[in-house]
Image (spheres, helix red, strand yellow):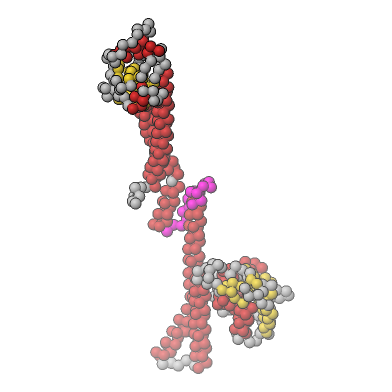
Amino acid sequence: MKNPFRGLTLRLRLGLSAAVAVALAVSAVAIASWLVTRQQLTDQLDSNLQSVQASPGYVQDLLSLCGRELPDTDQRNDTPTPYVVQVITADGTVCVAPGNKKVEVDGNDLAVARGVLGSALHDATSEDGQKMRVSTTHPDMPPRLSGEYAVSIAQPLSAVDKPLNSLALFLLGFAGVGVGGAATAGFGISRAGLRPVEHLTDAAEHIAHTQDLTVRIPADGNDEIARLSKSFNDMTEALATSRDLQQQLIADAGHELRTPLTSLRANIQLLIRSHTSGRKIPEKAMNDLLHSVESQVGELAALIADLQELSRPDVNPHETSLHVVALHEVARRAMDRVKLRGSELEFTSDLDDWYVLSEPSALERAVVNLLDNAVKFSPHGGTVSLRLGDGHLIVRDQGPGIPADELPHVFDRFWRSPTARSLPGSGLGLAIVAKTVQQAGGTVALRPADPQGTEAVIRIPGTHTHP
C-alpha cells in the first residue's frame, strides 16, 4: 500500500499526523456525545408520552367519531396539546379529532387494543409524512367507556431532532476548530522540535561541501535530539582526529623515508657514474657501497612493513579472526628468532603456560619488536631475559635505560629517543606493540630495571590452561 505521506517533509508529516490524530479523537468524542444525547432526549420524550393521559370525555368524543354511541359525561376536555391523540379500536379503526392527521398503526397498537399487550412504544409516520413518536396504552376508564380500544398519544420527533441537529452543528464546528488548532500546533511544535535536526542537516551539508570538521552543533538537554547532536559532534571530532593522525602519519612517514631514499639515490648515482665513465670503484669501496645499498633497501622494506601493520584496521576482541594463542610458545619462537641477531649477547627465558585471545602473527611480531629493542640497547656481552608468569610477559635488557621524561612518548609513532636516533629503526616498533596488545585487551608499559636497564611489561588477560 502506498504511503500517502511519502514525498512530504518531516515537518509537514508531523503536522498532518497531529491533525489526523486530533480529528480522530474529536470525531470519536463528538459521535459518542451525539449518541448519548440522542438516547437521553429519546428517553425523556418517551417518559413524557407515557405520562400524558387523555381525559375520558375526549376519549368519548373520539369513540363517537368511530360510530360508537356512548353515555354522555361531564368531563369533556380538549386535546392535550402539543400531542396528537387517536383512538384505535380492536378492528383497526382509527379515530382522531377533526384537523389532526392520523398516525400509522402497527401490529403492536392493535395488540394493545385487543388486550394482548399492555402498552406499545414506537416510531411512526403521520399522514402528512411527519415522523412521530407514539405511545399506545389501554387507559383505565370508567365502566361506561370500557371496551376493546386503545389510545395512542404521539408527538413529532422534531422535539428530538432539532436539538440533535443543533448539537451536531456545534460539535462539527468544535471539531473543525480543534483539528485546525491541532494542525497549527503540530506544525509549530514540529518546527521547534526539528530545528536541531535542521542545524544537524546544515552542518552535515557544510562538512560535505567544505570538508570542515571543526563544525559543532549546540547540544543542550538530555532528550533524543540532544543525544543525536552530541553523537554527531563526537563523530566529527573523531573524524577530525583521525584525519589529523593520517596527515601526521603521512608527514612522519615522508620524513622517515627521505633519509634512506636520499642516501640510496646518492649511492645509485655513484654506481651509474662509475659505469658510464668507465672508472672502476675500488673493491673495498664497492663492497661498502653495495652493503650500504642493501642496508638502505632493508630499512625501506622494514619501514613499509611497519606502516602496513599500523594501517590495518583495529580488530575487535570478540571477532572470530582472533584465536586462542599460547603466549609462552609465541614468546619462545620470538626468542629463537632474535637470538640470531644478537650472537654476542646472553639470552635467558622462564616461560609459564599462558593462553590468550589474539592474532598469532601480530602477537609474535610484538614480542619480537620488544626483544629487538632489548638487543639494540644491550651492551656487548649483556643479558636479555624473557619471563612469563601470572599473565605478565617481561622483557628486560641491561642497556642505559630510558629517561623518565621520555617514557610517556615511547609508544608514539615515529618517536625516537635522542640517544637512539643514530641506531637503525623507524620509531614504529613500540607503536605496533601497543596496538597489538590493546587489540588483545591487554596493556604494555616500559619501566626502569633494577639496577640497570629497561623492562617492557605486557599484561594480556588469559588462563593457565587451554580453554
Q: Is residue 433 magenta?
A: no
Question: Residue 18: image x %, image y %?
Answer: 41, 41
Whether 288 is drawn above or below 200: the answer is below
Whether 293 is drawn above or below 18: the answer is below
Front residue of this view, candidates 354 and 222: 354
Residue 124 occupies quadrant:
top left
Whether 318 is drawn above or below 67: the answer is below
* Residue found at x 47% / y 82%: 264
Residue 325 occupies quadrant:
bottom right
As drawn, is 173 to the left or to the right of 413? Answer: left
Front residue of this view, candidates 170 and 385: 170
Front residue of this view, candidates 407 and 89: 89
Residue at far left of view = 128
* Residue found at x 68% / y 81%: 349
Majority secondary structure of magenta residues? loop
Residue 193 occupies quadrant:
top left
Q: Is residue 421 visible?
A: no
Question: Residue 340: image x %, image y %?
Answer: 60, 86
Total labels: the figure holds: 0
* Residue found at x 39% / y 89%: 276
Specify start and end residues of the magenta stretch as a single range.
211-228
Question: Residue 305: image x %, image y %?
Answer: 50, 77
Q: Is residue 227 magenta?
A: yes
Q: Is residue 413 visible?
A: yes
Front residue of this view, candidates 198 and 175: 175
- Quadrant where the C terminus is found in the figure: bottom right
Question: Residue 47: image x %, image y %?
Answer: 42, 22
Residue at far right of view = 451
* Residue found at x 36% / y 19%: 148
